[in-house]
Image (cartoon, rainbow, N blue to C red):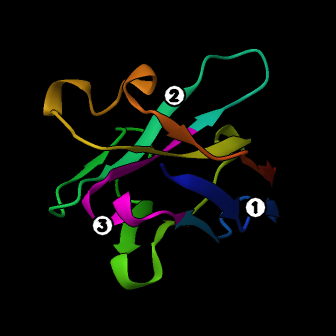
């Protein structure tokens, strides 16, 4: 079993940067595929980025070129570096994990069995 805990959210101005971190517990992290999702008020949870245990990386079109996902298996941590933030990026950001992956479902929230509690990101205009 894997437990996830996010940190790093906060309030920034448009154009600013934040780095989110997600620390995992459990031995399964090294072989888990990890992702970030976000949910804004009144909207469905949406995919942001994912990184598989083998290092394959995927991004939502809306964040390509601005966000970078990475992982440190020794620290059991996955990061989301967010640059050039926009008000539309305001949301609660969730870390998620799964024991396997397929390209077809990498962006599907229901395919992830492990979730953190979320961290709030607010971008002011």
Judging from the image, what secondary structure is the residue with disc 1 in? loop
The label on residue 30 is 3
Task: Give the camera-side residue of 41 and 101.
Answer: 101
Q: Using the image, determine if residue 76 lies above or below residue 9.
A: below
10 Å crowding of disc 1: few (<14), some (14-19), many (20+): some
Residue on which disc 1 sits: 9
What is the C-alpha distance between the residues marked 3 and 1? 24 Å
How dense is the environment of label 3, judged by Cα within 10 Å: few (below 14), some, or many (20 and up)?
Answer: many
Left or right: 62 with respect to 88? Answer: left
**Where does residue 44 sit, x and y in percent of width and height?**
61, 17
Report which quarter residue 88 is drawn in.
top right
Left or right of 121 on screen, residue 26: left
Tell me where residue 76 sits by quadrant: bottom left
The reply to whether the magenta stretch includes residue 27 is yes
- Looking at this rendering, what residue extends furthest in the bottom direction? 74
Residue 63, image x, y percentages? 43, 47
Q: Judge depth for marks 3 and 1 and give the one in front.
A: 3
* Residue bounds of the magenta highlight: 25-37
Is residue 57 located in the magenta-colored stretch of the structure? Answer: no
Of mark 3 and mark 1, the one earlier in the sequence is 1
Regarding mark 2 in the picture, which secondary structure is present there? strand
The answer to which quarter of the image holds residue 5 is: bottom right
Residue 123 picture location, percent across and down: 77, 52
Q: Nearer the viewer, mark 3 or mark 2?
A: 3
Residue at numbered disc 2: 46
Q: Is residue 43 left or right of residue 73?
A: right
Is residue 83 positioned above or below 51 on the image? below
């Amino acid at each position: 079993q894997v437990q996830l805990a996010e940190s790093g959210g906060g309030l920034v101005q448009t154009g600013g940067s934040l780095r989110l971190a997600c620390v995992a517990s459990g031995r399964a992290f090294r072989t888990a595929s990890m992702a970030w999702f976000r949910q804004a008020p009144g909207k469905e949870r949406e995919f942001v980025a994912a990184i598989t245990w083998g290092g394959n990386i995927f991004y939502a079109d809306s964040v390509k070129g601005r966000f970078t996902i990475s992982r440190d298996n020794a620290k059991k941590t996955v990061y989301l570096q967010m640059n050039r933030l926009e008000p539309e990026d305001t949301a609660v950001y969730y870390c998620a994990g799964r024991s396997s992956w397929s390209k077809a479902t990498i962006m599907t929230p229901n395919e992830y069995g492990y979730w953190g509690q979320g961290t709030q990101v607010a971008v002011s205009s």
